[in-house]
């Protein structure tokens, strides 16, 4: 699998780059990259509900929104991120690729739950996915030497899991890979070894000037805008929040004579396609039509009757 070198640490540019690897290429590629201190929220999350925005502002931490679902994550230069993109058929086995590669390097890593990689019961990585036509992208974090105190404060909001757990609990549940790879004195050495394993003899894929210009434009016009990173939810009159195998799903909606007039989804759920597409499709539908609707492309492992239960106002 060919690799792409990306020295940029601007989180908005890197979110645009990830989207381009999914939608702008045909080749199977991977990229190892880093962000300066930032919090990356999932496609369907509300920034004020998931992030300590005051702390971010006071500590010059950037907020960015990615194109995949899942929960909010903290990045700094002690964190290495990976992105793998290719045909959906070939990517079916890619979920376990990073855990397998870490094991080859000497880390006792294993997949756990819906999107975590654990080492000796502690989380060292989380990942998310997105499907676009016949291509799929999987991207995630690899914690090398992340500042766990800053991570905790950045994601600590009233009512959150981190707010309840506290810093000591986070330290006991999260692992930096540096602890398990003493043979690599620096993150750059770890990155080089990881790249060699994933490339397996394949060379570098270099973006053209036109391709890079496209990423620049998307970073400027979409991924760095207030509308994308904070956004507005429509005015709604009903709300329901439930936890499923795909994650927590919250639906906000309005009805007029039994017909859905506004719909929005929020949460840390995972799915192959953006839930915003489904929200548009639901406008104009009657609630009674929902139990027979196939929503599996938007919410992993969620059946139609469970989905319909979100609208039982």
Image: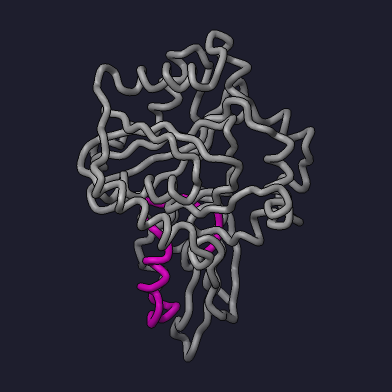
Snapshot quadrant of residue 261: bottom left
Q: Quadrant of the N terminus?
A: top left
Snapshot quadrant of residue 33: top left
Nearest the camera: 8 or 260? 8
- For this view, does 60 lie left or right of residue 306? right
Q: Is residue 292 above or below residue 286?
A: above
Residue located at (39% from left, 51% from top): 16
- For this view, does 310 lie left or right of residue 284? right
- For this view, does 170 lie left or right of residue 288? right
Q: Is residue 97 above or below residue 196?
A: below
x and y percent of residue 105 in the render? 46, 13
Numbered-mark total: 0
Q: Is residue 180 above or below residue 309?
A: above
Residue located at (54% from left, 72% from top): 232
Q: Residue furthest bottom?
A: 257
Instruction: Reply yes or no: does residue 267 show up in magenta.
Output: yes
Residue located at (50% from left, 24% from top): 110
x and y percent of residue 133 in the render? 24, 53
Q: Is residue 127 above or below residue 106?
A: below
Nearest the camera: 146 or 219? 219
x and y percent of residue 240 in the render? 59, 68
Nearest the camera: 273 or 308? 273
Q: Is residue 309 visible?
A: no
Residue located at (40% from left, 29% from top): 96
Q: Is residue 111 visible?
A: yes
x and y percent of residue 262 in the render? 48, 79
Q: Residue furthest top?
A: 183
Q: Quadrant of the C terminus?
A: bottom right
Q: Residue furthest left?
A: 26
- Range drawn in magenta: 266-289
Instruction: Reply yes or no: does residue 276 show up in magenta.
Output: yes
């Amino acid at each position: 699998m060919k690799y792409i070198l990306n020295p940029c640490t601007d989180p908005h540019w890197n979110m645009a780059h990830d989207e381009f690897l999914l939608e702008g290429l045909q080749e199977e590629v991977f990229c190892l990259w880093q962000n300066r201190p930032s919090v990356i929220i999932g496609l369907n999350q509300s920034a004020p509900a998931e992030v300590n925005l005051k702390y971010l502002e006071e500590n010059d931490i950037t907020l960015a929104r990615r194109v995949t679902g899942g929960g909010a994550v903290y990045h700094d230069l002690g964190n290495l991120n990976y992105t793998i993109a290719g045909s959906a058929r070939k990517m079916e086995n890619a979920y376990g690729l990073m855990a397998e590669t870490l094991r080859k390097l000497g880390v006792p890593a294993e997949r756990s739950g819906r999107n975590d990689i654990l080492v000796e019961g502690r989380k060292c990585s989380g990942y998310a996915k997105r499907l676009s036509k016949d291509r799929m992208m999987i991207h995630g974090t690899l914690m090398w030497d992340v500042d766990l105190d800053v991570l905790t404060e950045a994601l600590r909001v009233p009512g959150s899991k981190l707010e309840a757990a506290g810093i000591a609990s986070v330290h006991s549940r999260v692992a930096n890979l540096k602890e398990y790879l003493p043979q690599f004195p620096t993150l750059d050495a770890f990155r080089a070894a990881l790249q060699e394993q994933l490339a397996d003899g394949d060379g570098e894929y270099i973006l053209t000037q036109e391709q890079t210009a496209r990423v620049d434009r998307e970073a400027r016009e979409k991924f760095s805008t207030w509308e994308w990173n904070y956004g507005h939810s429509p005015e709604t009159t009903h709300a329901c929040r439930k936890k499923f195998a795909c994650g927590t799903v919250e639906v906000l909606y309005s009805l007029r004579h039994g017909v859905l007039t506004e719909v929005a989804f929020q949460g840390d759920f995972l799915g192959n396609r953006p839930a915003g597409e489904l929200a548009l499709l639901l406008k104009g539908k009657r609630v009674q039509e929902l139990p027979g609707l196939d929503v599996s492309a938007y919410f992993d492992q969620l059946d139609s009757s469970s989905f319909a239960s979100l609208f039982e106002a």
